[in-house]
Amino acid sequence: MKKWLPNVRLITLFSFMALLLAGCGEPFVSALTPAGEVAKMQYDLMILATLIMVIVIAIVTVIFIIALVKFRRKKGDENKIPKQVEGNHTLEIIWTVIPILLLLVLAVPTVSATFKLADVKAMEADTRDEDAVVVKVTANLYWWEFEYPDQGVVTAQELVVPTDEKVYFELISNDVKHSFWIPAVGGKLDTNTDNTNKFWLEFDGGKTEDAGGLFFGKCAELCGPSHALMDFKVKPLPRAEFDQWVDNMVAAKDAEHVPANDLAKAGEELFTSNSCISCHAINPGEKRPTAPNLANFGDRPSIAGKLEFSEDNLKKWLKDPETIKPGNKMSGTYDNKGLSDQDLDALAEYLMGLKVEE
């Protein structure tokens, strides 16, 4: 007994820790907190499947216990051979029909939901809905690009969408396989290099308010050393506010950005001389295959999709991005090691001034 005691203590400790950690985390970062039609459908299917499994386990457990108690070997019956029963047609029908019925109960809503979720006629060229919002998502190591082809707008790391209506997505990858996933809003879908996947999501306005106006997205396919850091933010807005955001982005395409002060002007010169401009676009109408568009960088809630938006964190990222996101394509493409504190101040001032929303 004493030999087993340490193991029992460890098992108890780890079980308690697992139970405790299962309750940790932010709200609306889980598929168990649905915040849209797609997420609700998938959540209901999970509950249905779990319910069926629990019922089956419960019935099998009860039958097992009954058989164990009723037909256990009793004292004095060691040499007694029980009555042999074979070919009971009633039992065979029961244990054949019941699994079929359970499978049908699960299969019918699953197939129905699958066809409903695959309906993207509103975004196709020959059946296009003029009011449909379409977003082309391009996955990169380790960042996300969001293009609104109907509006001619490109942004990165922050997805802006209207609430309470279907938003259609085209998914593709620029390098390796990734997977687009907003846990609270809908299941993941792969982004491939050689074909485009299409699907739709709906963002519930009430749930958006409960979530503080922001959802969180991730890459759900192991893609490299910084896979776990390949995050993005989702900002759902009422349709009128979304249209205003689009108008602001469209207007910014024709407006020349003017640095706010001399420090920002020095940062603009560094941005150009260090060839940052060759990788990053600063116009919301342009895109680069190598790095995120920075047109509305100053409006974003995070830096590199990971760090809280602040001047200090921006300087850390500019100084040594490899320590924050190992394997990112920015490391080694410019002379970040040679940047002085004054250079970092100037670049940070310039980049934080790249805003579309006032």
Image (spheres, rainbow, N blue to C red):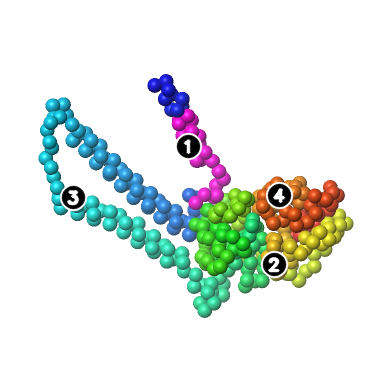
Disc on res. 322 = 4
Q: How many marks?
A: 4
Kindly identify the amino acid type of the residue bearing the numbered disc 4. Answer: Glu
Q: Which residue is drawn at 76% across and 51% down?
A: 318
Residue 21 falls within the magenta-colored stretch: yes
First in sequence: mark 1 vs mark 4: 1
Disc on res. 91 = 3
Kindly identify the amino acid type of the residue bearing the numbered disc 3. Answer: Leu
Kindly identify the amino acid type of the residue bearing the numbered disc 1. Answer: Leu
Q: Would residue 181 be found to the left or right of residue 304 on screen?
A: left
Question: What segment is highlighted magenta in the picture?
Answer: 10-31
* Residue 317 spot, x, y in % from top left: 73, 50
* Residue 108 spot, x, y in % from top left: 35, 61
Residue labelled with disc 1: 19
- Quadrant of residue 249 within the rendered picture: bottom right
Q: Is residue 18 above or below residue 196?
A: above
Kindly identify the amino acid type of the residue bearing the numbered disc 2. Answer: Lys
Q: Which residue is drawn at 76% across and 64% down?
A: 278
Element carrying mark 3: helix
First in sequence: mark 3 vs mark 2: 3
